[in-house]
């Protein structure tokens, strides 16, 4: 579960083009263009009924950290992460041949690539302990051995980047105080370290200037109000507030310019959307940089600053722009780059080469390489399982409906190929995590598996979702389980109004906060849906808000402003928690849980399952002993998706049987 903070910009996974889709051509490709281009390629009849294994044998590819070195200085290989063995590991990808070289070989914990060392073949990677989110930072030495740079029990660490000369690695850890992350500089040769910044106020570290002088810190005050502070790492002075203001305005740091002259930051001061502005570090002057009719998601730079990469959240799609800062022109990519969304732009050190991913709702992310001088382009990976054809998949479509009170709710629709008025299909309302997340139009093996097996999926972005302006974003503040839940119920009614959907077979499914909404729908609107699938969802807000991980301290105040303080709002939390009202659950429910989940503890699901079964409800329960908040292992993703389909085939597509709990 990820709780929204005061920024409407981007999740912690999205930094410097580290995620998000966008473009081809000269340079941004809109969602409609990508959809049209893909649709033209459909030629043969789709094959339906594929197994979960077929969908999840599609390979996931991802780039290393945006603050690291993506290209090896020795070999020119690109550092990526891939789950081709079933477990995520780090690989070196040859841009000439597309050959991959395994750099780590974990068969248990997901191990993510971060960065090459600037002058040799060593790399940095990160891994946690089976989904417990206590990530450590490791060096993979030239001989393949892994060395833990951040040892210790209950330590969580993050890679923050490199010094400009590559002699130091910046890493944050919470070893001094579980609630606060301090910044350390590690010698790249000896691994000796020194404390650079002691984070006495437990602020959220956002970015370090390339020259190593400035550290940008975010301070979320409420879900609508936040600040940026700057710490001068060459002095002992306390961080300085640079966003003094009145009223509710959200500020957050994106990145520093490559020459360390300015901070680029987000603000929604001037309307509904986040704009990108600059703050001159010498004069303190501010100036607009990027304005759009949607939220600016991120802004970052190539090593010298020749190229600026930015993204805009365009109605669930991501429009990426690569700008040549010297000419002011957008970069034109070769026509051979397929239509779709760019997902992670990285440059080599001299900025003559660029690597990026391209994905869409019908194409998983593939890594591409372009020589910026010659225009040579190569697709280096093929993620889609050869047993699948693009025409077996369905395009995502943005669809809106008017909710119970007239508020327009957007969402992403996946309509099965065989759905028609003559052959209506069962359907699911898919609820995203958060609160404050957003369902977006991208490739999802889990959704495509369900749709290929005859289930329509509508991923509704209920009020409180990000990406649709700050007014919509704050409509559910301290009202969770109320109007946002009613939006999901209304989404079910909307599906029933479609002539190609069976009005007697509409269910609800969601993970994390979406799992909570699923359980809440079954509890507080017991006749609204025919089944529900709760994937590691909160069921007891009293316990959850009292047991949040200590490393969330930097936005505890904003979280409590969003959800309510357990010290004063426990009565309301109890009132909206499905666990305490489980006797109202009458429809079949599937519960999925990871034993190592630090956000939604296993006891949450254990107790809900027991309580619902005690009252005669049909409940199936799948517990993964080696997962946390989500699925890191392919075999577990397959098991979970098989469980979804089996459950739906029995209790939604067919007649719901009567009987005791299972």
Image (tube, rainbow, N blue to C red):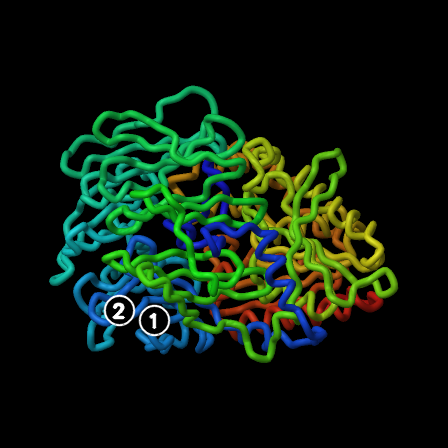
Label 1: few (<14), some (14–19) or many (≥20) C-alpha neighbours in 10 Å: many
* 471 lies above or below 170: above
Depth check: give the residue in front, 498 or 506.
498
Q: On the image, numbered disc 2 is attached to which residue?
A: 76
Depth check: give the residue in front, 68 or 300.
300
Q: Are marks 1 and 2 in contact (CB under 8 Å)?
A: yes
Q: Which residue lies at the image location 55% right of the left edge and 44% below the top edge? A: 314
Residue 186 drawn at (x, y percent): 17, 55
Task: Tell me, for residue 368, which label it has, or none.
Answer: none
Which of the 4 quarters of the picture holds residue 267? Answer: top left
Q: On the image, numbered disc 1 is attached to which residue?
A: 95
Q: Which residue lies at the image location 51% right of the left edge and 49% below the top edge? A: 318
- As measured in the structure, the alpha-carbon distance from the residue carrying label 1 to the one carrying label 2 is 8 Å
Residue that extends furthest to the front in the rendered view of this protein: 374
Residue 127 visible? The answer is no
Q: Which residue lies at the image location 51% right of the left edge and 61% below the top edge? A: 359
* 414 lies above or below 106: above
- Closer to the chain start, of discs 1 and 2, is 2
Residue that extends furthest to the bottom in the rendered view of this protein: 387
């Amino acid at each position: 579960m990820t709780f929204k903070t005061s920024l409407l910009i981007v999740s912690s996974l999205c930094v410097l083009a580290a995620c998000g889709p966008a473009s081809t051509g000269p340079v941004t490709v809109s969602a409609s263009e990508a959809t049209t281009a893909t649709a033209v390629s459909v030629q043969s009849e789709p094959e339906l009924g594929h197994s979960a294994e077929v969908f999840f044998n599609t390979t996931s590819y991802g780039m290393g950290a945006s603050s690291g070195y993506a290209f090896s200085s020795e070999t020119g290989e690109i550092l990526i992460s891939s789950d081709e063995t079933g477990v995520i590991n780090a690989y070196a990808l040859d841009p000439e041949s597309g050959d991959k070289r395994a750099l780590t070989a974990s068969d248990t914990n997901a191990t993510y690539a971060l960065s090459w060392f600037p002058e040799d073949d060593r790399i940095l990677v990160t891994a946690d302990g089976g989904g417990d989110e206590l990530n450590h930072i490791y060096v993979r030495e030239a001989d393949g051995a892994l060395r833990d740079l951040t040892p210790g029990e209950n330590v969580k660490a993050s890679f923050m980047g490199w010094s400009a000369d590559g002699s130091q690695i910046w890493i944050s850890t919470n070893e001094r105080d579980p609630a606060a992350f301090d910044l350390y500089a590690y010698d790249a040769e000896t691994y000796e370290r020194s404390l650079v910044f002691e984070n006495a106020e437990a602020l959220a570290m956002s970015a370090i200037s390339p020259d190593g002088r400035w550290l940008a810190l975010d301070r979320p005050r409420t879900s609508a109000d936040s600040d940026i502070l700057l710490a001068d790492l060459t002095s002992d002075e306390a961080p300085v507030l640079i966003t003094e203001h009145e009223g509710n305005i959200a500020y957050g740091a994106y990145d520093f310019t490559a020459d360390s002259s300015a901070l680029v930051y987000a603000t929604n001061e001037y309307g509904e959307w986040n704009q990108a502005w600059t703050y001159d570090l010498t004069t303190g002057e501010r100036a607009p940089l990027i304005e759009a009719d949607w939220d600016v998601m991120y802004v970052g730079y190539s090593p010298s600053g020749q190229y600026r990469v930015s993204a805009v959240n365009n109605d669930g799609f991501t429009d990426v722009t690569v700008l040549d800062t010297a000419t002011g022109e957008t970069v034109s990519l070769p026509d051979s780059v397929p239509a779709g969304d760019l997902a992670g732009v990285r440059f080599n050190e001299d900025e003559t080469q660029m690597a990026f991913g391209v994905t869409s709702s019908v194409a998983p992310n593939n890594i591409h390489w372009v020589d910026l001088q010659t225009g040579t382009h190569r697709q280096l990976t093929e993620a889609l399982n050869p047993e699948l054809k693009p025409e077996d998949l369905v395009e995502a479509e943005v669809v809106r409906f008017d909710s119970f009170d007239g508020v327009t709710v957007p969402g992403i629709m996946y309509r099965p190929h065989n759905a028609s008025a003559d052959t209506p299909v069962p359907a699911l309302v898919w609820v995203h995590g958060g609160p404050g997340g957003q369902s977006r139009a991208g490739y999802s093996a889990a959704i495509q598996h369900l749709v290929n097996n005859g289930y329509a999926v509508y991923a509704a972005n209920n009020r409180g979702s990000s990406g649709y302006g700050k007014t919509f974003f704050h409509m559910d503040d301290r009202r969770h389980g109320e109007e946002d839940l009613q939006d999901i119920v209304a989404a079910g009614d909307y599906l029933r109004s479609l002539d190609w959907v069976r009005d007697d077979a509409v269910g609800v499914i969601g993970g994390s906060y979406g799992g909570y909404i699923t359980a809440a729908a079954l509890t507080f609107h017991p006749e609204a849906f025919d089944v529900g699938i709760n994937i590691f969802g909160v069921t007891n807000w009293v316990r959850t808000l009292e047991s949040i991980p200590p490393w969330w301290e930097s936005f505890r105040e904003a979280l409590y402003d969003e959800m309510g303080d357990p010290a004063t709002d426990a009565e309301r939390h109890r009132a909206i928690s499905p666990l305490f009202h489980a006797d109202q659950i009458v429809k079949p429910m599937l519960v999925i849980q990871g034993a190592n989940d630090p956000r939604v503890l296993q006891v949450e699901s254990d107790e809900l399952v027991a309580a619902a079964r005690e009252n005669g409800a049909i409940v199936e329960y799948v517990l993964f002993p080696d997962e946390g908040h989500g699925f890191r292992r392919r075999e577990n993703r397959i098991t979970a998706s098989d469980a979804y389909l089996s459950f739906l085939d029995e209790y939604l597509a067919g007649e719901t049987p009567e009987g005791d709990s299972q």
